[in-house]
Image (spheres, rainbow, N blue to C red):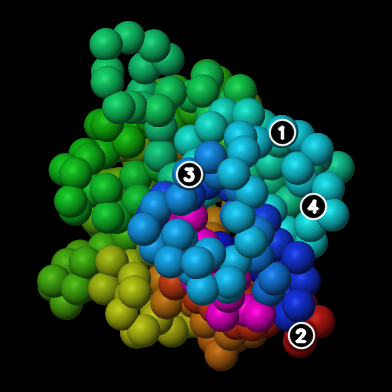
C-alpha cells in the first residue's frame, strides 16, 4: 500500500521528495495533483522522474540527503531506504502530534532472515506504532495467528506499540461465524501478553469484505463487533482493557467518518485508500469539528 497523509493545503507550496526511483515517482504524482511545487533530491533519477525533470515539471537536486535539505519546504517525503533520511523525518515529527508507524515487522530482533525488518530497526528510526496481522498479509503471505502473536510480542519487547488487525471475510460473515472468527484471532494473537502491556496495544477491526471495496460496515455493524472485542479484552486484561484503543478499518471515507465516530464503541479509524486523497483525508482527520 502506498499512503500519503497530507494535512496541509499544498497548492503552490514547496515540497521535497527524497529519492529518485519508482516510489519517489508515485509521491511526485500525488503532490503534483495537489498543486505543489516539487523538488526531487537524489543523485540520479529513474526514467519517470527524469522525464518530468526534462519537461520542467520538477526541480532536481543531484545530491545525497543532508539534514539541512529539509529547510524551506512545507512538506518533505522520504521515498528512499536511506536511514539518514528516515531519521531526519522522525526528528522533524518530534514535538508534533504526528507519530511514525510501520506496516510490518519480523518476530526476531536479529539473525539470518534476509529481507525482514526487525523491531530494533524500526525503533532506531523513531517508529512508534506498527501494524501486525493486516488482512492482506494474512491472505497473501499466509500469516497465521501464531505468527501474529510472535510479532506482537516482538513489538512490545522493542518498545513499539502494535496495532493488531482482526476481521472476517464475506463467507464467514454470511455463515454467521464472524464473531467467533474475530474472537479466535484476538485470543490467539494476544496469547501470553500481560495485562500491564494493555495501554500499549491497539486493535483494528477490519472486515476483509470492506477493505478497498467501497463497501464499509455500517456503524451498527462496527459497534457490535467493537463491543465483542472490548468484552474479550476485558476477559484477558480485566480493568486494564479500557486502555486498549479499538479502531475501525475498511472503506473509511469522508462521508461515513462522522457516523462511525458517533459510536462510543469506535475509538478511531485505520484509513487506507482515502489517505491518498488529500481533501478527503483532511476531512476524516477533522471529523470532530465537522471539518
- Neighbourhood count class around disc 3 (C-alpha, 10 Å): few under 14, some 14–19, many 20 upward: some
Distance between the alpha carbons at the discs numbered 3 and 1: 16 Å
The furthest residue to the bottom: 255
Disc nearest the viewer among 2 and 1: 1
N-terminal label among 4 and 1: 1
- Neighbourhood count class around disc 4 (C-alpha, 10 Å): few under 14, some 14–19, many 20 upward: few
Q: In this image, 217 relative to 88: left or right? A: left
Give the secondary structure at mark 2. loop
Distance between the alpha carbons at the discs numbered 3 and 2: 40 Å
N-terminal label among 3 and 2: 3
Question: Does residue 157 lie above or below 101 as drawn?
Answer: above
Residue 214 in sight here: yes
Disc nearest the viewer among 4 and 1: 1
| Viewer-side residue, 234 vs 216 | 216
Distance between the alpha carbons at the discs numbered 4 and 2: 18 Å
The x and y percentages for residue 93 are 76, 45
Name the quarter where the C terminus is drawn. Answer: bottom right
Residue matched to label 1: 66
Name the quarter where the N terminus is drawn. Answer: bottom left
N-terminal label among 4 and 2: 4
Residue 17 in sight here: no
N-terminal label among 2 and 1: 1
The x and y percentages for residue 6 are 66, 67
| Viewer-side residue, 76 vs 135 | 76
Residue matched to label 3: 44
Residue 97, label in figure: 4
Residue 291, label in figure: 2
The x and y percentages for residue 92 are 78, 42
- Read off the magenta span: 23-35
| Viewer-side residue, 288 vs 221 | 288
Give the secondary structure at mark 1. loop
Amino acid at each position: 500500500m502506498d499512503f500519503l497523509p497530507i494535512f496541509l493545503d499544498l497548492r503552490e507550496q514547496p515540497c521535497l521528495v527524497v529519492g529518485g526511483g519508482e516510489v519517489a515517482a508515485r509521491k511526485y504524482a500525488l503532490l503534483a495533483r495537489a498543486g505543489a511545487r516539487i523538488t526531487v533530491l537524489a543523485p540520479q533519477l529513474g526514467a519517470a522522474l527524469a522525464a518530468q525533470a526534462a519537461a520542467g515539471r520538477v526541480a532536481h537536486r543531484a545530491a545525497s540527503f543532508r539534514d539541512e535539505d529539509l529547510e524551506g519546504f512545507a512538506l518533505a517525503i522520504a521515498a528512499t531506504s536511506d536511514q539518514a533520511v528516515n531519521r531526519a523525518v522522525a526528528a522533524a515529527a518530534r514535538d508534533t502530534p504526528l507519530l511514525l508507524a510501520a506496516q510490518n515487522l519480523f518476530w526476531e530482533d536479529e539473525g539470518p532472515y534476509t529481507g525482514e525488518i526487525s523491531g530494533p530497526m524500526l525503533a532506531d528510526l523513531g517508529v512508534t506504532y506498527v501494524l501486525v496481522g493486516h488482512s492482506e498479509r494474512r491472505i497473501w503471505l499466509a500469516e497465521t495467528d501464531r505468527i501474529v502473536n510472535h510479532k506482537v510480542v516482538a513489538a512490545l519487547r522493542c518498545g513499539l506499540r502494535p496495532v493488531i488487525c482482526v476481521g472476517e471475510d464475506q463467507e464467514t460473515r454470511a455463515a454467521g461465524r464472524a464473531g467467533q472468527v474475530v474472537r479466535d484471532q484476538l485470543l490467539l494473537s494476544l496469547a501470553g501478553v500481560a495485562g500491564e502491556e494493555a495501554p500499549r496495544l491497539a486493535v483494528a477491526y477490519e472486515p476483509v469484505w470492506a477493505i478497498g471495496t467501497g463497501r464499509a460496515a455500517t456503524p451498527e455493524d462496527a459497534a457490535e463487533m467493537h463491543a465483542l472485542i472490548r468484552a474479550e479484552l476485558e476477559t484477558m486484561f480485566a480493568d486494564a482493557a479500557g486502555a486498549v484503543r479499538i479502531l475501525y478499518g475498511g472503506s473509511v471515507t469522508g462521508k461515513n467518518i462522522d457516523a462511525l465516530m458517533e459510536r462510543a464503541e469506535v475509538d478511531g479509524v485505520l484509513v487506507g485508500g482515502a489517505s491518498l486523497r488529500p481533501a478527503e483525508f483532511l476531512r476524516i482527520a477533522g471529523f470532530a469539528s465537522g471539518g
